[in-house]
Image: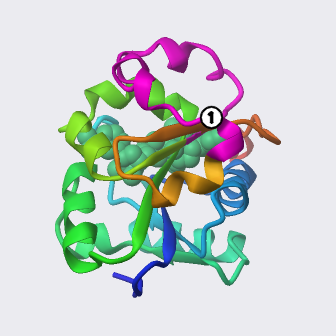
Amino acid sequence: MPPAPTGLRVGLFGGSFDPPHEGHLLVAETALRRLRLDRLWWIVSPGNPLKAGRPPAPLEARVSLCRRLADDRRIVVTAFEASHHIRYTADLVDLVLTHRPTARFVWVMGADNLATFHRWQSWREIATRLPIAVVDRPGATLAPLSSPAARFLASERLPEADARLLPGLSPPAWTFLHGRRSTLSSTRLREARARSS
Ligand SMILES: Nc1ncnc2c1ncn2[C@@H]1O[C@H](COP(=O)(O)OP(=O)(O)OP(=O)(O)O)[C@@H](O)[C@H]1O
Ligand SMILES: O=C(O)c1ccc[n+]([C@@H]2O[C@H](COP(=O)([O-])O)[C@@H](O)[C@H]2O)c1
């Protein structure tokens, strides 16, 4: 796990990244800028527990592609879930908060993940353990805001204009960030690659 000294403002951006693309980079840049983060841990997951079926590309290959794409000294590409045999984000959050108790963490995710957040293991606990920043995504702008998780957390939503305050707030607290968007998805890239091979 990367170091995180006291007070460091760190975004946790987990994903399959199979493959990584410019849409991910846009999310990372938006979070760094709007939340005034010092670091963004780009956490390549062994596999999304809700995505059954086709296994993802090998972890090391995905990590290398992420490192090549994320050319910013504030972004740390890491994959420590695998070495700790962790699959669920609730366990990841637990591990991070136990080992780096004095930094300020924010979970960062695209808006499509807000729509399905209520299906994640222990999602209410995740929301009470660290603030969450949701970044707008084409095709997932309005529906996620009426999802079970968004409704459950409605009264804890921070106005977007105050997003820089989020890393210092006690959870539950979250915000929805709008900005430049990308229509890219890993699925589309995999399909394009399959068509051309
Ligand atoms: N174009 C995008 N705009 C905003 N957020 C995105 C975008 N693409 C991915 N994300 C977010 O990045 C994180 C990692 O996403 P993931 O690796 O699953 O990429 P994906 O393009 O959604 O992949 P797939 O098509 O395989 O589901 C998630 O929080 C997801 O919501
Ligand atoms: O913990 C869960 O139940 C859970 C369910 C779905 C997704 N996640 C996490 O959400 C992040 C984004 O996943 P993905 O596949 O959309 O890139 C990644 O870190 C996953 O491990 C976690």
Residue 128 x %, y %: 27, 44
Residue 192 x %, y %: 71, 40
Residue at 38% across, 26% down: 153
> What's the coloring here?
rainbow
Q: Which residues are magenta?
A: 134-162
Drawn side of residue 16 relative to residue 152, left or right: right
Closest to the observer, 72 or 52? 72
Drawn side of residue 3 relative to residue 122, left or right: right
Residue 166 x %, y %: 53, 52
10 Å crowding of disc 1: few (<14), some (14-19), many (20+) = few
Numbered disc 1: secondary structure? loop
Closest to the observer, 12 or 161? 161
Residue type at the position of mark 1: Pro
Tell whether position 141 is magenta.
Answer: yes
- The residue carrying mark 1 is 159
Residue at 42% across, 24% down: 155
Closest to the observer, 69 or 94? 94
Residue at 67% across, 21% down: 139
